Image (cartoon, rainbow, N blue to C red):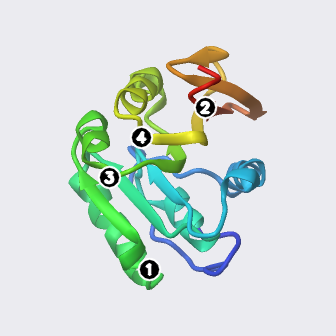
Amino acid sequence: MRVIAGELKGRRLRSPEGREVRPTTDKVKEAVFSMLLPYMEEGFTAIDLFAGSGGLGIEAISRGAGLVYFSDSSRDSIALVKENLAHCNVLEKGVLLLGDFKSNIKRIRGQADVVFMDPPYADGFLLPALDALDARDSVAPGGAVVCEHSKREELPDEYAGFRKVKDRLYGSIAVTIYEREAEDDA
């Protein structure tokens, strides 16, 4: 696994052993970041909600994020994210949050411009995570939430103050991007 573009392009990131964590493929990562260009102004804030190895959040840092919150319920995953951030010399741009996603969302300060959600596919976390982000007002108006999921999982066009703006398939992987509705749109 590597950083594919930006300031850290080409840096190798350590991947987890075993099959519990499934890093986003380079093909999907490149497609996601191409779709996110309108949301990524220099210094943007991001959340990597089910961080795993931290690949998506570190890619965001490489492409100009000023701060990324890395959230995971696994102590091993958080340790791996910390190791990858240190390897890339960007430890100061990451905030590590160990715990379940709902608790971690409550610990995030301010609003994010981009949120990455790539949870275990079979666990049904995407809609509850959107609910939690909405309840805490964690996404800036006009901000994006990227949901990576199985192509068998159909997500609604609108949900909890978020509107679907893109939906793409990459083999067995689906990517749905929601945009946070502005106050006057809701």
Residue occupying the point 43% across, 28% down: 134
Cα–Cα span, label 1 and label 2: 32 Å
Q: Is residue 174 above or below residue 24?
A: above
Q: Earlier in the sequence, mark 4 or mark 1?
A: 1
Q: Nearer the viewer, residue 169 or 71?
A: 71
Residue occupying the point 70% across, 48% down: 32
User: Residue 108's spot in the image, x, y percent?
Assistant: 31, 49
| Residue pointed to by mark 2 | 182
Q: Earlier in the sequence, mark 2 or mark 4?
A: 4
Q: Earlier in the sequence, mark 1 or mark 3?
A: 1
Category of crowding for the residue at label 4, using alpha-carbon neighbours closer than 10 angstroms: few (below 14), some (14–19), many (at least 20) = many
Q: Nearer the viewer, residue 47 or 29?
A: 47
Is residue 17 among the parts visible in the rendering? Answer: no
Q: Earlier in the sequence, mark 4 or mark 3?
A: 3
Q: Is residue 21 above or below residue 68?
A: above
The label number, if any, that marks residue 119 in the structure image: none
Q: Quadrant of the C terminus?
A: top right
Q: Judging from the image, what secondary structure is the residue with disc 1 in?
A: loop
| Residue pointed to by mark 1 | 90
